[in-house]
Amino acid sequence: MTKDWVQWHQDYDNPNSWLAKRLEIVQHNLCRALDDAPYGPDGTRRLISICSGEGRDVLPVLAKHDSGRSVRALLVELDPTLSQRARATAADLGLQGVEVATADAGKIDVYLGAGPAHVIIACGVFGNISSEDIQRTIATLPALLAPGGIVIWNRGLLENGDDPSLEVRTYFDEHGFAELSFTSPAGSRNRVGMHQLSIHPAEIPPAAPGMRMFAFC
């Protein structure tokens, strides 16, 4: 059965839910990324949010952060109800630099005109795709990033207590990233990481048009 992602988002409104607590960590990390990430030649930053949902990870932060309104952001969400909510929120907050695409976030083509990004948000992604797709996605991210670009991601514990975030951290290390932070609150299944691209751009192969990074399981 396909998950009802609109209903899933309702847990954000419960301040005691794991989703609301994860949101707090992600937003904190995004504030830090907006402090530390490089700028483009034109003095702006570009941000990509993969599987962005209603934009809760990104939009409130851009509205409040000192540099948020200079960010050019692309939010990609397949569900039309969620993407329209994100579009409406961006308009209500006066975020003119935000574009919301109703599109398959697993396909590389949707990002090719938006980069290179200085910040990428990949939250709510790795828990819904295969290990092979996680590795493929992380291997592809450098082609979407500017030098020194930052990725914020999450991966929760499994029901049996296994921690697949260890595997994710290894993949980032293998593909040219340095870990900036890793948050694993006591008593919580939430795991949120932040990694910065550290390899030289000449070492990064370009993204191939038409490729698929991942598909939801």
Image (cartoon, rainbow, N blue to C red):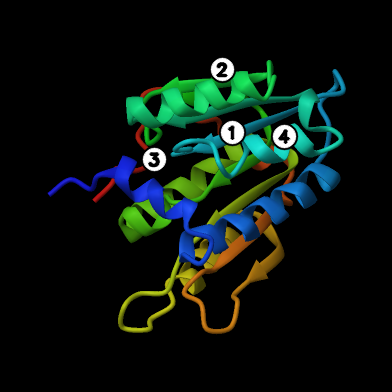
Q: Residues within 10 Å of mark 3 (few under 14, many from 20)?
A: some
Pointers 4 and 1 in contact (C-beta within 8 Å): no
**Quarter-of-image position of residue 184:** bottom right
Total marks shown come to: 4
> Looking at the image, is 135 positioned above or below residue 168?
above
Q: Position of residue 31 (x, y in %)?
A: 76, 48
Q: Badge 2, how many Cα within 10 Å: few under 14, some, many 20+?
A: few
Which numbered marker is on residue 62?
A: 4
Depth check, front residue: 45 or 2: 2
Q: Which mark is residue 213?
A: 3
Q: Earlier in the sequence, mark 4 or mark 1?
A: 1
Residue drawn 55% across the image and 37% down it: 49
| Pointers 4 and 3 in contact (C-beta within 8 Å) | no
Q: CA distance from mark 4 to mark 1?
A: 13 Å
The secondary element bearing badge 4 is classed as helix
In front: 44, or 94? 94
Mark sitting earlier along the chain (4/2): 4
State which mark lies toward you, 4 or 3.
Answer: 4
Q: Amino acid at mark 4?
A: Leu
Quadrant of residue 206 in the image? top right
Give whichever of 49, 214 is nearer the camera: 49
Do we see residue 173 in this rendering?
no
Q: Is the Cβ of the residue at disc 3 closer than 8 Å to that at disc 2?
A: no
Identify the secondary structure beneath mark 2: loop
- The disc placed on residue 86 is none
Q: CA distance from mark 1 to mark 3?
A: 15 Å
Q: Residues within 10 Å of mark 4 (few under 14, many from 20)?
A: many
Q: Which residue is mark 1?
A: 48
Q: Which residue is mark 2?
A: 113
Snapshot quadrant of residue 200: top right
Which dot, 1 or 2, sits closer to the camera? 1
Q: CA distance from mark 4 to mark 3?
A: 27 Å
